[in-house]
Image (spheres, rainbow, N blue to C red):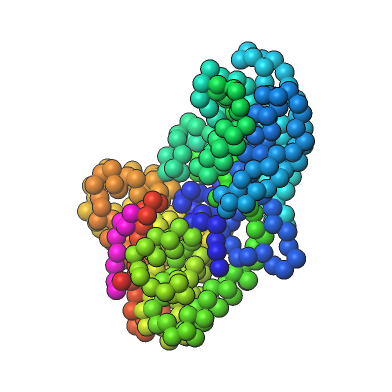
Amino acid sequence: MTTPDDLPDDEFAAELLADEEIACAPPRRGMRTGFTTGSCAAAAAQAATTYLLTGSVPTSATVRLPSGRDATFEVHASAVGDGPDGRWARCSVLKDAGDDPDVTHGAEIVARVWAMPHGLTLLRGSGVGTVTRPGLGLEVGGPAINPVPRRMIVDEVTRAMGTLPGVAVEISVPGGEELAKRTLNGRLGIIGGISILGTTGIVRPYSTAAWRASVGQAIDVAAANGIESIALTTGGRSERFTQQRLAWPELAFVEMGEFTGYALKQAERDHMRHVVLGGMVGKFSKIAAGHMMTHVAGNQVDPGYLADLAAIAGADAATIESMRRANTARHVQEIAIERGVHRLFDVLAAAVVERCRAEVGGGLELGCLLFDFDGTLLAQAGTV
């Protein structure tokens, strides 16, 4: 099973920012995939740049997705005009989320482009949120456009610029501020609109039951092939980081996603000897707090719990209070590193092991690998 990435909670906050591209199971048979707001923004930006350069109205734009495949988008609307910065061109693409229940399905993603003396500047237009709090991996005060969509927009505009020395690209979403009220952007301090998201460029319709079943099946297959030690990871990035640490066969790695309790019990039923959990601060803080089903819809990250662990780790009162006021688990992590409270990660990893041991008893050897968002090992606990 392949999930888009470690999207949940503050690990790029994608699950919290919108109901888009939730890390999930493959689509049920017959269900259509769709495209992320990031893919649509990149296509609109490419089309607008081409329009500005050539003066010809584009009818479509073909972009390269992060997976390496190409996707073609129909241009919904286009216009040109003159403004304080000179001639501009504007194109839009309608988001098609396929059969996924996505709040941004049908939204118009608009890019307006005008020439600059040099470089490429990415700007927030109406309906796109502004980041007002730290902890999201995005610049405070900047547009809520996540790293992969930013890269896609830059790549597509650069390819289309031709003789233009530089451009400014403004992304907007008509009605985006209203759409954002149906997401958790406000709680994260993203105001004024939606976020431009996506890690694979594709939205896959999800089925929680199918995903859960596929986790169990993956553990069954490992057991049937004589594997006694498996790694349960919270997502694609966590799996890659764990694979770099453990020289185990491919079948030993299972992306459990949200289903920690179910995966542990399945491993116990299949008579596994050893389980190592790989993940990041957001998911692991939920597991340590006793939430064996970690989807954001049921359980949100509690910075106060992490602050309590920081107290155990010896943090001073001011640091503990800063953590309690933190926006996300990622923000807590940043505070801990900045203030030198590295023992917090050891305490958290040990708490994950103890909570999982309480879930399944003493039948499994348990270990934990806690990673930073770039793959740095912050802590390990138990038997690894």
Does residue 233 sit above or below 227 in this rendering? above
| Residue 218 included in the magenta stretch of the image | no
Q: Which residues are magenta?
A: 376-383
Which corner quadrant holds the N terminus? bottom right
The residue that appears at 57% across and 53% down in the rendered structure is 67
> 296 or 55, which lies in front?
55
Residue 73: where, in percent of width, then height? 72, 43
> 294 or 305, which lies in front?
294
Task: Give residue 83's quadrant in the image.
Answer: top right
> 367 or 361, which lies in front?
367
The residue that appears at 52% across and 81% down in the rendered structure is 221
Horizontal side of residue 331 vs 216, given as left or right:
left
The residue that appears at 56% across and 49% down in the rendered structure is 66
> 48 or 258, which lies in front?
48
Residue 368: where, in percent of width, then height? 34, 67
Can residue 58 be seen here? yes
Residue 81: where, in percent of width, then height? 72, 18
Which corner quadrant holds the C terminus? bottom left
Q: Residue furthest front?
A: 163
Residue 208: where, in percent of width, then height? 62, 67
Horizontal side of residue 38 vs 226, given as left or right:
right
| Residue 378 included in the magenta stretch of the image | yes
The residue that appears at 40% across and 82% down in the rendered structure is 228
Q: How many marks?
A: 0
Horizontal side of residue 225 vs 179, given as left or right:
left
Majority secondary structure of magenta residues: strand
Can residue 289 be seen here? no
Does residue 240 sit above or below 20 in this rendering? below
Task: Give residue 123's quadrant in the image.
Answer: top right
